[in-house]
Amino acid sequence: MAFTPLISLLHRIRRAASAPLAALALLATTGISAETADAAELVMVEQPGCAWCARWDAEIAPIYPKTAEGRFAPLRRADLRAMPEDLTLSRRVTFTPTFLIVEDGHEMARLEGYPGEDFFWPLITGLLQEHAGFVPTGSSHNAPDQTTAPLATNG
């Protein structure tokens, strides 16, 4: 897996760190909840025997529904060999796991593969922000009452 796109996305996430504050202010003035502004879902495309899917299940699946990301984009699972007919994809899914950001049945973005827990959170949070209007409101994905993963920093 090439890391150049991951590094590029992490840089874009850092540069956009102030954008969530402006979006949150806009939502606050309109009375729209940050978690209900868009009807997004995270579709995990998997297949039996996928070791990286099993690793995601062990490391992320138990906490995902308790995070702001999980409440904003609930998890839906799909089998690679039996893709749901109600999904419109930008291209065929080849790798598992592949995580699709979906709104109204249309793919908005994707993360191919599971890069490990430390990279998954900033990548999926960044994709949700950029493509689905997600506005993180906390500082940690590890606690159910906190709402998002911290951004990676040098240090």
Image (spheres, grey):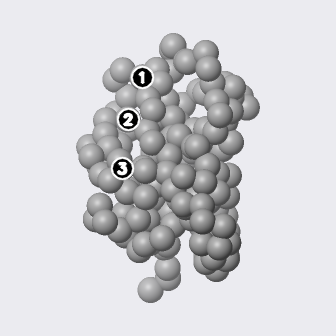
Mark 2 and mark 3: Cα distance apart in space:
14 Å
Mark 2 in CB contact with mark 3 (< 8 angstroms)? no
Measuring from the top left, give residue 16's x and y in whole percent.
66, 73
In the shown orientation, is residue 46 left or right of residue 39?
A: left
Residue named by callout 2? 53
The residue drawn where x is 38% and y is 35% is 53
Mark 1 surroundings: few (<14), some (14-19) or many (≥20) residues within 10 A: some
* Front of the two marks 2 and 3: 3
**Depth check: 84 or 113 in front?**
84
* Residue 58 visible here: yes
Residue named by callout 3? 64
Amino acid type assigned to the residue bearing label 2 in the image: Cys
Mark 1 and mark 3: Cα distance apart in space:
20 Å
Residue named by callout 1? 47
> Image height check: is 151 above or below 59?
below
Q: Residue furthest bottom?
A: 155
